[in-house]
Image (tube, rainbow, N blue to C red):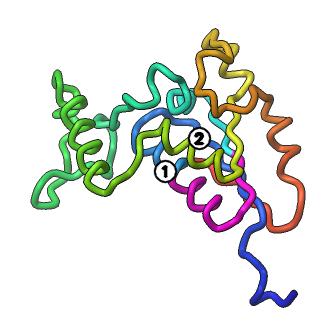
Amino acid sequence: MSNLEQKPLDKVLIICAKGNLEDVYAALVMANGAVMEGIETKLFFTFFGLEGILKKRMDKLHTATVGNPGMRMPGDLPFPTLLGALPFVEAGVSSMMRSEMDKLDMPPPSEFLEMITAGGGEVFACKLAVEMFKLKKEDFSPEVKDIITIGQFYEMATGQNTQIIFT
């Protein structure tokens, strides 16, 4: 097979370590895109990224409003960090983000995980973070295949054309 006929990646391992709406969606969109391209896909959620796979919280994620340099206001003005600390601002911004995602027909995280696993992708939770936060397997989405160590995750990174992405 020539280089032109090869896929750019054969396998992608995506690590999600943050639990805000934009970071969890970044991991889910990349994973779903990889699955759709026929790339072997594995998602590893660790520390606050576990929010993206917890049954009780995954479809209620919030947008980070404090300390987020990418936040913009109408007219492309920077979003003052102080505003994000005011009561209800984060909830309002998060609601607006979800509304915009709905307009683009983006599924909630629970549906994204179903699509990813239905396409052959695999989802894992970090054993260290799970133990640290005193969680159990039943706390997670049924799409979570297993709770594993980072060493076990790295063992999955074998083969040429494998990439690890950290979100």
Q: Are marks 2 and 1 in contact (CB under 8 Å)?
A: yes
Nearest to N terminus: mark 2 or mark 1: 2
Residue range (magenta) = 29-42
Which residue is disc 2 drawn over? Answer: 16
Comparing 164 with 56, the one in front is 56
What residue is drawn where x is 15% and y is 51%? 73
Q: Position of residue 106 (x, y in %)?
A: 38, 51
Quadrant that contains the N terminus = bottom right
Q: Position of residue 107 (x, y in %)?
A: 41, 46
Q: Is 130 situated above or below 10?
A: above
How far is the residue under mark 2 from the one under mark 1? 9 Å
Q: Quadrant of residue 21?
A: top left
Q: Residues within 10 Å of mark 2 (few under 14, many from 20)?
A: many
- Left or right: 160, with 120 as reference point: right
Residue furthest to the top in view is 134
Q: Is residue 34 magenta?
A: yes
Q: Position of residue 60 (x, y in %)?
A: 37, 28
Three-letter amino acid code at disc 2? Answer: Cys
Which residue is disc 1 drawn over? Answer: 26
- Check disc 2 and report its element: helix, strand or loop: strand
What residue is drawn where x is 28% and y is 37%? 65
What residue is drawn where x is 31% and y is 57%? 104
Q: Number of labelled discs? A: 2
Q: Quadrant of residue 142?
A: top right
Q: Position of residue 116 (x, y in %)?
A: 61, 48
Q: Is residue 5 magenta?
A: no
- Left or right: 104, with 109 as reference point: left
